[in-house]
Amino acid sequence: MQGHKEQANHETLMDHPFARSTPTVERVKRLFDVVDTEDVVAVLINADPDSMASAMALKRLFWRRVKRVSIYHINPIRRADNLAFVRRLRIDQQPISKLSPSKITKWAIVDSQPHHNEQFAPYPFDIIIDHHPVGPEIKAQFVEIKEDYGANSTIMTEYLRAAKIKPSPRLATALFFGIKTDTDNFVRESLANDVNAFRYLYQFTNMNIIKKIESSEMTRKTLASYQLAIERVRIFHNTAVVYMDEVQDPDILVMIADFFMKLAEATWSISAGIWDETLIVIFRNAGFRGNAGKVAEKIFGHMGGSAGGHKGAARAEIPLEIIKKQTKGGDIERFLLSTFRGAL
């Protein structure tokens, strides 16, 4: 891998995304110029429907243009609906533990950026395609970051269309669901581009599979987590806050934050819990004022972890040892409630 890193540094690197005026056809051409027919490509993701669909689309774009494309996810997939997504759409991917870096000649990351997770840090990415805010020192042969897009799947759909590739029903269904989930059915911020991609994919999408995936979000284990969350939730003004203590899967925090947004009185929903010696906080915002990403960054950005996101959805991850220093007597719940009351 080190040898490839040295080789990549001799290539022309982009240190910022494309200009808005650059046509999509030109972007796709630049993407194809990064690879050749002997390349073995690894696509790394933090697995959720949008990232998995985006990885599938990149694999399709590179069909017959490279020797092989493999998808690797850094996180365990435990959510029932995500497992149904993988199973129903037969997504071919492997955990990062199965990766053999010495066999890879090109590295890609989609729906994330290298600084988003320390597990991405060792890899010399040649291709970065994302829709989150641009991070520091982004450099690669190909950098496409459209932070105003609601879903990364929208970017990939536009690439497929520019390359004149009609998506298969399986790929179209994955991209359709990726847009659907990341925009929360267009409740979160999105662009006309997201709507146009969604409408284009509809004609190829298997809606029966979509319905089945959406109806597969509950298991007995998650039901118990919802019960605990309902018992623990605290509501003040227009904000629902729940601290779950230790959780077996951080995805449950996302589900709980989304769940409490269903409250008629809630404009903000915040769920927090501890996983792998890390405090994870999920923010949801549906108000005209306020920005979840900015609030997350304001509260936690200076604490040494990661924090940020969009207007309607954000996430913070802070090492537990840092949080314990901020609390009085180790009462994390009291610390969080006090902090959120002061910030919202």
Image (cartoon, grey):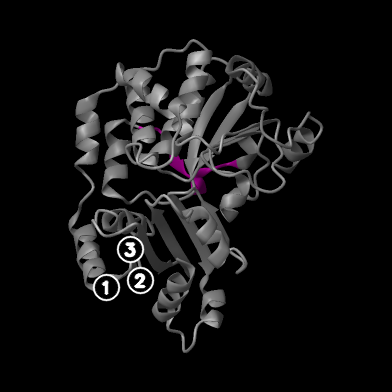
Q: Compared to 10, does 233 lie above or below?
A: below
> Disc 3 residue type?
Asn
Rounded to the nearest whole Å, what is the CA distance between mark 2 and mark 1? 7 Å
Q: Are marks 2 and 1 in contact (CB under 8 Å)?
A: yes
Q: Is residue 228 magenta?
A: no
Count all numbered tags in the image, as a single digit.
3
- Foreground disc of the pair 2, 3: 3
Q: What residue appears at the point 31 percent right and 21 percent down from the top-left corner?
A: 202
Q: Disc 2 designates what residue?
A: 243
Rounded to the nearest whole Å, what is the CA distance between mark 3 and mark 1? 17 Å
Q: Disc 1 designates what residue?
A: 232
Q: Position of residue 188 (x, y in %)?
A: 39, 42
Q: Please state the extent of the stretch shown in magenta in the rendering.
A: 91-100
> Disc 1 residue type?
Arg
Q: What residue appears at the point 48 percent right and 18 percent down from the top-left corner?
A: 160
Q: Disc 3 designates what residue?
A: 238
